[in-house]
Image (tube, rainbow, N blue to C red):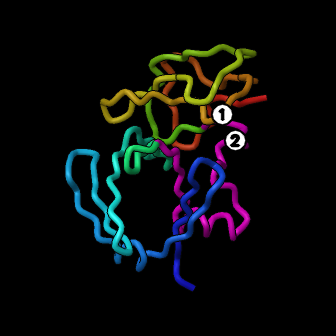
Amino acid sequence: MEESYSIMVNEDHEFELTQDQINALDILKTGYNNFHILKDGKSFHIEIVESNFNDLKYAIKVNGTDYHTSVKTPLLHLIDKMGFASNGAINVASIEAPMPGLILDIAVKEGQEVNENDPLLILEAMKMENSITSPRNGIIKSISVSKGDAVDKKQVLLTFE
């Protein structure tokens, strides 16, 4: 079975495209975010209006009509098929140090409610400041480190309720 991409358009139309089908499209880049596609003798002018590459979501115009799209890659299909959640950060119970370093700042307190991507703390490692952000919404249960602490890789820094 050939790997395919799923494209959801306006959350009500889904299209499956294989890599061969994508490669067979006659696509010409006509500007920074503009493309011309010729498919089955029909001409389509595409403009990418907004893009969120991390979430694979795009706002596009096709011949002047607005569409909202999301893409599911072959890797995401495989993750679903294996029964894993592609948004596994939702179930994160604790934050561990990704590398050895020094805690420069702690931006939260125990009992504080945080949202996904809120800054939690700053870890200095290899002379670089790394902002550790929350992978999910939640409440901080405990903080296991203090400002100025040296930490080891995989050491628990804080936990969520």
Residue 90: which disc? Answer: 2
**Which residue is pictured at 74% across the width and 23% down the height?**
139
Say if residue 110 shows up in the picture: yes
**SS label for mark 1:** loop
Q: In this view, does 20 lie to the left or right of 88?
A: left
Q: What stretch is highlighted in magenta?
A: 66-95
Sort mark 1 into few (<14), some (14-19) or many (20+) by Cα contacts within 10 Å: some
Quadrant of the image occupied by residue 127: top left
Quadrant that contains the C terminus:
top right
Describe residue 56's horizontal placement relative to residue 42 as left or right.
right
The residue shown at (66%, 21%) is: 114
Q: Nearer the viewer, residue 42 or 1?
A: 42
- The image shows residue 92, relative to residue 37, as above or below, that is above
**Picture coordinates of residue 82, whole percent (x, y):** 69, 69
Vertical relation: 23 (above or below) 106: below
Q: Does the magenta stretch include residue 15?
A: no
Type of residue at label 2? Ile
Q: Please give the name of the residue rendered at 54% of the width and 17% of the height, measured from the top-left corner.
A: 106
Question: Residue 128 location in percent, x, y?
Answer: 33, 30
In this view, the residue in front, 86 or 36, is: 36
Residue 64 locus on image (x, y percent):
38, 44
Crowdedness of circle 2 by 10 Å Cα count: few (<14), some, many (20+)?
A: few
Is residue 55 among what the camera can see?
Answer: no
Counting residues from the N terminus, which is met first, the one under dot 2 or under dot 1?
2
Horizontal and vertical percent for residue 153? Answer: 51, 42
Compared to residue 34, the image places residue 37 above or below, namely below
Q: Which mark is residue 147?
A: none
Report the residue marked by disc 1: 136
Q: What element carries label 2?
A: helix
Most foreground residue, 27 or 108: 27
Q: What residue type is labelled 1?
A: Arg
Residue 82 lies in the magenta stretch: yes
